[in-house]
Image (tube, rainbow, N blue to C red):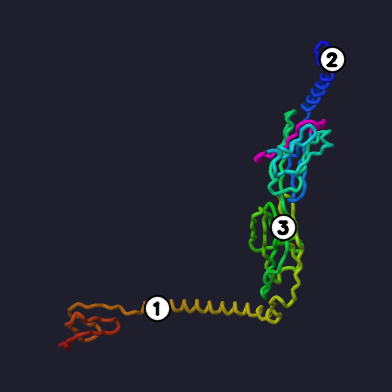
Amino acid sequence: MDCESGLPASFLWTAAVLVILHSSAGDSDLICYDQPIIALIGNDVTLPCHLQPGINVIDWRVEWTKPGLDPQHVHVHEEGRMLYQTQNPSFSLRTRLFMDELLQGNVSMMIFRVTLSDEGTYRCTIPSAHKEALVHLRVGSVSSPAVTSLNISSGGVVLRCESAGWYPEPELLWLDDEGNVLSTGPPESVRGPDGLYTVRRNLSVDQTHRRNFICRVQQEKINQNRETHFNITVPDDFFPTVSRSTFRICVTLVPVLFLVCCIVIGFLLIRSKLNNKHETRQKEKQPEVVFLTEAETENPDSDQQIQISNPDSFSIRGRKTSRGRNHTRPLT
C-alpha cells in the first residue's frame, strides 16, 4: 500500500496501464473501407475496419450498428465476449468479430448468409476511444440466362433470352460471336415479391445474321455479368432466296422500266405544251361580237343599205347574221 495516497499499488498500476492504453487509442485512427462492399445473396461477407496504429482492444466495447434498424445493434462486443441480448433478431447467429485479431486493433465484422435486407450502411464505434466510422454494404443477386426458341417460320427464327433472380435490376443484351451488340426488341423486366428481377428479350434472326449468338446479362453496380453462348443450326434453304436468273431479270428490267417512264413523262409534257399553244391560237382567232344599235349602216363593199329594224340583230366579222326581220331596198 502506498503510504502517502492510501491506495494499493496494484490499483495504481492498473490505472496507469488503462491511462496508457486510452492514450494510445487516442493516437489511433479508426479506418474502415471507404468503397461499397459487394456481397451476393447467400454468401458471407466481411466489413473491414481497424485501428491504425493497431492496439489491443479485446477488452474494450466495440459496437456495430445499422442506422434505420430497430434495434440498431448488429453486434456488440465487450470485455472479451459478445452481448447477445442487445442484438437485433434479424442478425441472430449471423455475425462475429475476429477475436484473435482484436489484439492488433482489427475490429472487422463478418456477416453470414447475406440477405437482401442486409444492404445498407453500417457504423463501427469504439466508445471509450471516441472513434467511429461507416461502411456501406451493397447486396446483389445473379443467375445465368437461358435461351429458348420462341417461333420458327419461313421469315426467320425468334429467340428469347431470359434470366431470373437478379438484384439490382440488370441489363440484357444480345451479341454476335464477335461481341457486337445486335438490334433487338424492347427488354422486359419484372420484379417479384422477393425483390428480385426477371429480365427477358427477344431476337429475330434472318439470313443476314450469323449463326452464333451470345446472351449477356450484366449489372454494373455489383460488377457482375453472366452470359450464355447459343448456336442455331438452320438449313441453307430454310430462308427464302432469290435465284440468279430472277436476279438477272430484275437487274435488266429496272433500267428498261426507268427508260419507259422517262419516255412517257416526256410525251405527256410535249403533249401538254402543244395543247397550250393550240388553245392560245384558238383564242386569238375567235370572232369579235359587235352589237349594233338601231340605225342605218352602210356597207362600203356593196351597193346595198341595210336597215336594222330589230335591236337583237348583230354582226360577226367575216360574215353577217341577223335575227328577226330585216328590210332591204335597192339604191336608186
Q: Is residue 203 in view from this perspective?
A: yes
Residue lying at 78% horizontally and 28% vertically, measured from the top left: 25
Under circle 3, the secondary element is: strand
The amino acid pointed to by label 1 is Arg
Q: Magenta span covers which residues?
A: 51-71
Under circle 1, the secondary element is: helix
Quadrant position of the C terminus in the picture: bottom left
142 or 183, nearer to the observer? 142
Q: Quadrant of residue 292?
A: bottom left
Residue 239 image offset from top left, x and y in percent: 70, 75
Q: Is residue 12 magenta?
A: no
Residue lying at 84% horizontally and 17% vertically, measured from the top left: 9
Disc 1 target residue:
281
Q: Residues within 10 Å of mark 2 (few under 14, many from 20)?
A: few
The amino acid pointed to by label 2 is Met
146 or 46, nearer to the observer? 46
Decide whether the magenta segment is chiefly helix, strand or loop: loop
Q: Residues within 10 Å of mark 1 (few under 14, many from 20)?
A: few
164 or 112, nearer to the observer? 112
- Mark count: 3
Disc 2 target residue:
1
State the residue lying farthest toward the top.
4
Q: Quadrant of residue 107?
A: top right
Q: Residues within 10 Å of mark 3 (few under 14, many from 20)?
A: many
First along the sequence among labels 1 and 2: 2
Label 3 vs label 1, nearer the camera: 3
Under circle 2, the secondary element is: loop
First along the sequence among labels 3 and 1: 3
User: Gap between marks 3 and 1, in whole Å?
Assistant: 79 Å
Disc 3 target residue:
217
